[in-house]
Amino acid sequence: MADPTDHSDIKAMSFEQALKELETIVDRLEKGDVELEASIVIYERGEALRAHCDGLLRQAEARVEKISLNQNGQPTGTEPLDVED
């Protein structure tokens, strides 16, 4: 039987896959039809999924560039996007 605390599979998930599973977990917890021990396990998985999504978003932000324009409004190139932490 798989270890419910092993979250190594999360690292291979795309943002969309992780977000979809996280939404499913939140829905189950909000309904309140999960036994206490199971809710703790899926909450921990949800936290791991949230951290993974956060990391993927930060990576995407780091790759985003903004277009720089000259005085005439013509594109001159790109520069890193300034992202506030």
Image (spheres, rainbow, N blue to C red):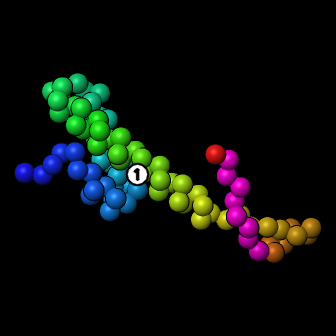
Residue closest to the far right: 71
- Is residue 75 covered in magenta? no
Q: Position of residue 45 (x, y in %)?
A: 28, 43
Q: Position of residue 55 (x, y in %)?
A: 47, 53
- Is residue 82 covered in magenta? yes
Which of these two is toward me, 50 or 17?
50
Q: Does residue 23 appear anywhere in the picture?
A: no
Say which residue appears at 81% left-offset and 75% top-offset: 76
Which of these two is toward me, 43 or 66?
43
Say which residue appears at 32% left-offset and 62% top-offset: 12
Q: Quadrant of residue 17?
A: bottom left
Residue closest to the far left: 1
Q: Position of residue 36 (x, y in %)?
A: 18, 25
Magenta part of the chain: 77-84
Q: Is residue 3 above or below residue 62?
A: above
Q: Is 77 on the left or on the right of 71, as rendered? A: left
Q: Is residue 47 above or below residue 79?
A: above
